[in-house]
Image (tube, rainbow, N blue to C red):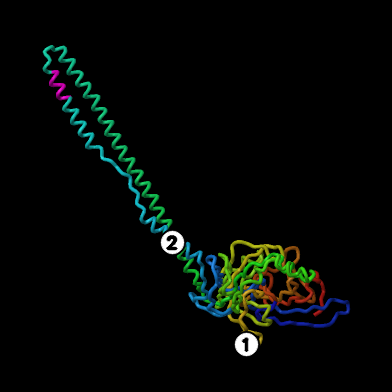
Amino acid sequence: MVRPPIVLALTALLVVGCSSDGDPRVQVAEVGRATVVEAVDAPGTVTARATASVTSPAEAVVVEVLVQDGASVAAGDVLVRLVSPAADERLRQALTAQRSAKASVVSVPQADLGPLQDQVDLAAEASFAAGREAAARIPDPVLAAEAHQRVEEAERRFAAASAASRASLDQLGAGAQSVEAALAAVTGSQRVQAAAAVTAARQTVDALLVRAPLAGVVTLGAGSAPAVPGAADLSGLLDGLPPAVQGPAQQALGASGSAGSSTTTSGGLAVGTPLAQGAPLLTVTDVAGLTVEAEVDETDVLLVQPGTPATVEVDAVPGARYPATVRAVDLAPSTSSGGGVSYRVRLDLQPGLTGDEEPAPAPRPGMSAIVDLQVRTAQDVLAVPAAAVVRDEGRDAVFVVESGRAIRRDVRLGALGHDQVEVLAGLEPGATVVVRDADRLSDGQAVRL
């Protein structure tokens, strides 16, 4: 993987020769300061910024295709015109149902029996008054008292009956009002449903005039009439039959395959072909802004943040390099092709340059790429060549040449570049470190410069 050039103030010293006692010869470098760029490589795929697929809104027939395959269109441009008797019929039925729902008014007849009860009460009151007057004219005091008592008892019973009657009349009126309110709610719901059905049906009819959902490049494509399963195999078998029976066999298979015709556009979208609801019509791809989706291993993803710069190399354009910037990092993991856990990182891709510093061709969606994410940059820091670092038992170390011997020094590292690494502790500027085959040395071993 080619990485950005890194300038190191290291002086390489190579002396070829051996001492008489066979001490190993070593290549060394002087420790200096440099800018170290730590990068993470990840496989990626070029993708379009947006893609929209359009399907048939109903059972329909293509009557006109107004755009060529591969043409650039603006959002809202009319691309295809369909006709659908079924959709038109559904709209007609929905409008009829809506008119019926609007005209539907339900009312419950309510009889006002209050005046009749008032008349009964007045008649009873007059009757009781006449009874009291008749009782008062009885000469015998005992009989007069008994008659008066009977009038009062009858008056109490009537009062109770009258009150119960009025309560029943009130409940009857309230019940009628409740029924009327419930029926009104039902009819209101029917009106809402009818209006929703009209809206949906009208949207379907409007969608028969297919428009571009976004600006981009059109790819035409619609499913043709379904083929008879095995028809190709059966037609091949017909060739092996005797000539006398080939004709009857073809008739037995059916002549529908040869009947009828359709006119096909350059993109394969057939004019006159019936389409099922949901059949693919076309796809519009926005290639104005390309993106890259990279699969970053779980061990490196925490180093990647929105805004992280990167360089992208596309397999189809050898030598070209495209700048990119991380836009988002997925929270949910995915399983990589190697079986490990990775996270999808989305980057905005910018125009690139070839190896000759000429403008590189724009990649196409779906092309494979390698993404070099520059996760950390340490400027003007103490650095050594990456080959000088030896890792043993979980510790990092280098070998410093002092007085003809290789002395092991444990070091603490920072940014890890491809060619150089940052040293945070364990070395001083100007030290001479072994930069080749350091892993073959032992602490204190005599070496030859």
Give the quarter of the figure containing the N terminus.
bottom right
For the stretch drawn in magenta, the main secondary structure is helix
Query: Are the residues flagged by discs 2 and 1 in contact, CB closer than 8 Å?
Result: no
- Residue 329, given in percent of the width and then of the height, sits at 58, 67
The image quarter containing residue 448 is bottom right
- Residue 97, given in percent of the width and then of the height, sits at 42, 57
The image quarter containing residue 120 is top left
Any part of residue 338 in sight: yes
Q: What residue sits right under mark 1 in the picture?
A: 358
**100 left or right, relative to 407:** left
Q: Earlier in the sequence, mark 2 or mark 1?
A: 2
Residue 87 belongs to the span the image colors magenta: no
Q: Please name the residue shown 15% across and 15% down the image.
A: 144
Residues at marks 2 and 1, CA–CA distance in whole angstroms: 58 Å
Q: Is residue 268 above or below residue 358?
A: above
- The amino acid type of the residue labelled 1 equals Glu
The image quarter containing residue 92 is bottom left
Q: Secondary structure at mark 1?
A: loop
Any part of residue 376 in sight: no
Region in magenta: 128-135
- Residue 350, given in percent of the width and then of the height, sits at 58, 79
- The amino acid type of the residue labelled 2 equals Val
Q: Please name the residue shown 64% across and 80% down the image.
A: 321
Q: Is residue 315 above or below residue 425?
A: below
Give the quarter of the figure containing the C terminus.
bottom right
Name the residue nearer the viewer: 402 or 146.
146
- Residue 8, given in percent of the width and then of the height, sits at 67, 80
* Other residues around mark 2 within 10 Å, as few (<14) / some (14–19) / many (≥20): many
Residue 133 belongs to the span the image colors magenta: yes
Q: Secondary structure at mark 2?
A: helix
Q: What residue sits right under mark 2 in the picture?
A: 198
Task: Tell me how many marks there are.
Answer: 2
